Image: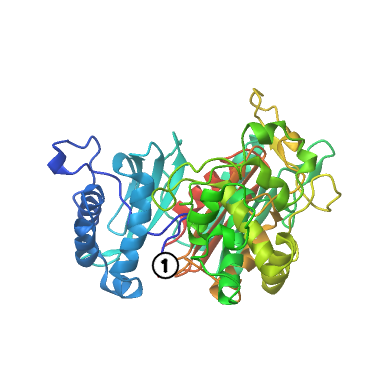
Amino acid sequence: MGFFTAFSLIAFGSLLVSSSQGQTPTVSLPSTQAGKHTEAYLKAFNATGEAAMRSFFESHTAKGSLSELPVEQRLSRFRQMKQRLESLRLSKVLNASEESISVVAGAGSGSLVQLDFQFEPKPPHGLLGIRVEDLGDEGEVQAAGARKSSDTELVKAISKYLDSLSSADEFSGVVLVARKGEPFFQQAYGYADRERKIRNEVDTKFNLGSINKRFTKTAIHLQAAQGKLSLTDPIKKFLPDYPNKEAAGKVTIEHLLEMRSGIGDFFGERYQSTPKERIRSIADYLPLFADKPLEFEPGTNRRYSNGGYVVLGAIIEKASGTDYYTFVRENIFIPAGMGNTDSFEKDKNVPNRALGYTRGDGRGKGSWGSNYGTLPAKGSSAGGGYSTAQDLLKFVVALEQRTIPAPDTEQGLGIAGGAPGMNSALEWDPQPGYVVVVLSNFDPPSAEKVARQIRAWLPRSS
């Protein structure tokens, strides 16, 4: 059974500090075989160099899983995770059994992550897969509760949970749960327009936030397969007039994809001072950040970068000879049957589109206000497009069937997006075939919280 993450798939753990450091963990793992595998992983993660992690993968991974994803690929993903998190420190054990362990761990980089191990159902309970989910700097994480025994039981639990959240005005949006491409739970809650009392429907279009980055990544791999670009190409090959000449020469497309470019964000003082109605194209985003110095030498670190994905959008335009929005529509959305997915201008009338509502700016509980003023006129290759739950399921089906390129999805997918008045989560676990889509027009973590709870309840695959 594979797991999925917005970054990379690796083994995970709650964290025990290596005994060689002379520290005693404050939280204990169970003394089961699964617990011992987890402890071994955590010690290997915190060790210096890669030898300990290589040894872990060779001796603790289920043989069948190891044949599907060899050690070298696992080490490649470990390097990315190690670079991003630095170290792991066990904070809380959420759930533990012979087949799975879920924990919250503090990272040396300062973030908090949830780590979900999945093991073989029979001894020696070797590692099958891991999911790594960022919870932010604090992250309110609660024990998720027992897995459900069937899809029928799962539907009852989801319905009760969402009815409660909706009644408390804590969730507004659409939730879809499917298996093998067929939805068995699909329900809308709350209002698409609170002022006009227009309710959300199952086919309402929601702002996806950063989920659009997956479409951008797919577009880049599609152009690579067409021979229009190479992942090793520097920015200057396509954008010779890029304002930062150092970045233009040193930063490659692969750096941009993996957020190892050193290019920062477009959010900041320039964005705040720019009339949002003027931001309507990829080119309109570039002046917000492109001339700024690199935050680190390309390839030496990893930092989340909206700016980097804007640059990818500009490269897609140069390589294709058309604008970014047209390219993804014609080469991804239409082939996948995603007729309700696109980047819409905020001041244009779009039927069945949810408006966003936020409790930011000091608003108290129960006081939701419009997020309109925070939005650019049109989203970018870094985020801000719209889609429906049904279309995102179609996207997963297209990935599974290889109708469109599916980079880094061998073991599934887990992506999310969020900003004031919007939150989205898409999760896909290929082996049992579950897809969970949660779209919300409330602040984060309204959708991610629901997706996390549903994932914890999913019945085990037979």
- The kind of residue on which mark 1 rests is Ser
Where's residue 230, x and y in %?
A: 53, 69
Q: Few, some or many C-alpha atoms within 10 Å of disc 1 (few <14, some 14-19, many ≥20)?
A: few
What kind of colouring is applied to the model shown?
rainbow
Local SS, label 1: loop
The residue singled out by tag 1 in the image is 461
Q: In the image, is residue 199 above or below residue 4?
A: above
Q: Nearer the viewer, residue 81 or 363?
A: 81
Q: Is residue 117 visible?
A: no
Out of 109 and 289, give the one closest to the viewer: 289
Residue 407 seen anywhere in this rendered image of the structure: yes
Nearer to the camera, 157 or 195: 195
Query: Percent from the top left, x then y, of residue 441?
Result: 68, 43
Point out the image quarter for the C terminus: bottom left
Task: Relative to 374, say whether 129 is above or below.
Answer: below
**Direction from residue 336 to residue 452 in the image, left or right:** left
Q: Position of residue 232 (x, y in %)?
A: 48, 65
Q: Residue at x 54, y 62 (%)?
A: 435
Q: Please tell me whether residue 365 is drawn above or below residue 378 in the rendered image.
A: above
Closer-to-camera residue (238/423)? 238
Measured from the top left, where is residue 402 in percent x and y? 56, 76
Residue at left offset 76%, top offset 38%? 276
The number of discs equals 1
- Pick the quarter of the image with the N terminus: bottom left
Q: Residue at x 22, y 50 (%)?
A: 39
